[in-house]
Image (cartoon, rainbow, N blue to C red):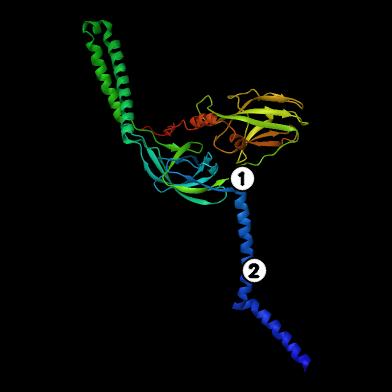
Amino acid sequence: MYYIIYSMRKRLIALFLTLSMIMPNGMVFADTVLEGHAQKDEVIKQELMDEIFTGQVDTVDRSDIIHMTVSQVLDSNINIEGDEFFAEVVNDVRGDNGVIIPKGTFAHGKISQTTESKRLGRPASISLNFDYLITPDGREIPIDGKMSTKLHPVTSVAKIAVQDVGYTLAGGALGGFAALNWLGLEAAIASNGYTLAGGAAIGGVLGLGAALMRKGNDVLIAPGDEIKVKINTKVSLPVYKDSALMQHEMLYPGLDIKITNIKHEEDPFGEANTITLTLMITNLSDKTISGLDSGLVNDYNAIFRPSIFGDTKLMFRQVRPGEKVVGDISFAVDNINRKFWLTFYDRRSKKPITKISVDNAYKNVSEKTKKKNDKVRTKRKNYKKQPDVFDPLD
């Protein structure tokens, strides 16, 4: 009898434990387990935050300008109001205590307005609005940013007026030369110069007509074109640790390569697409390297070889084991605003043996050089679209 009662008690306890796992009361136990996981996740998240941020907070102010480059072509002839796009921050944005918006942060934007080019030389325009940033650590930050290629009305009218005067003066000069050729120098002297004046007047009318018929330029903003976005809101952001923003590098034993200066330059055709690096190479390795073994690799894994249009001092120089060399080498790239790694390749296997981050080195470049680089990259102001030779003439 006692055995039967004991067995029934064991069954009841087992049944109770089973029900506690599936009945609502059992949810307490399940919640406790999940809560433990959630607490662990919070701890891990906090540890990651401590690795990335200093714990300080700075503010993006309304007077701040953020330099960006668009991720796709924006064309005044194609894009319309409401079209979405993304842009990428090309410079670290610093507060009083450090970097608060790192290079590589994406910005979401929409086209707020487009206008077509018109007669009287009035150019097309594109106006952009930016509503949030996506940081490399995955945070979305609401902002209110604006950028427009539209000139101020007074500036626009003045610019058109100057251009039209230029057309008129050119027309006048051509008209005067035509009168001189048709009527001769003697007729001009005999008429006390009235023939030249008449020719200039006719030429002036022709020039004015050309000015009235002239159509303004269309606008095209392409990847690599740097735009300046004005922030119209005030946002408080955590400050990044410098160590969290360092790019990964690959080193080769005994081969010490330091990038001591970085210059952004124009090629012979006026395009700002050349990066010139000043290198200090100390080769205590078992490899012989040269500039011809090097390339700039961007974050899309595109490789750009040394350019003959830039500084070629190190391009053909071989650095043998035991040698130390200082010099410049230039690379022509498709988008000067991307992340790059100076990479040297093994001559036999063609595999990379070392990768040095250009972005890491850029943090130590002088402010004077950085300002010069900014001027080179932002030299293009009007984003004028070059006419296609196959487009019909207006």
Left or right side of 138 for 178: left
Binning the other alpha carbons within 10 Å of mark 2 as few (below 14), some (14 to 19) or many (20 upward) gives: few
Instruction: Please provide percent x and percent y for residue 346.
Output: 73, 33
* Residue denoted by label 2: 33
Instruction: Please provide percent x and percent y for residue 162.
Output: 32, 26
* Residue denoted by label 1: 244
Binning the other alpha carbons within 10 Å of mark 1 as few (below 14), some (14 to 19) or many (20 upward) gives: few
Instruction: Please provide percent x and percent y for residue 324.
Output: 72, 25
Q: Give the residue furthest to the bottom.
A: 1
Find residue 367 and report its image quarter: top right
Left or right side of 173 for 47: right
Q: Height in image: 228 above or below 85?
A: above
Q: Height in image: 35 above or below 47?
A: below
The residue sitting at 22% across, 11% down in the picture is 194
Q: Specify the quadrant that holds the C terminus.
A: top left
Left or right side of 283 for 364: left
Disc 2 vs disc 1: Cβ atoms closer than 8 Å?
Answer: no
Tell which of 382 and 228 is nearer to you: 228
Given the image, on which type of amino acid does mark 2 rest? Val
Instruction: Please provide percent x and percent y for residue 233.
Output: 42, 47
Find residue 43 and report its image quarter: bottom right
Q: Earlier in the sequence, mark 2 or mark 1?
A: 2
Disc 2 secondary structure class:
helix
Given the image, on which type of amino acid does mark 1 rest? Ala
Q: Height in image: 167 above or below 111?
A: above
The residue sitting at 47% across, 33% down in the picture is 378
The residue sitting at 51% across, 36% down in the picture is 224
Disc 1 secondary structure class:
helix
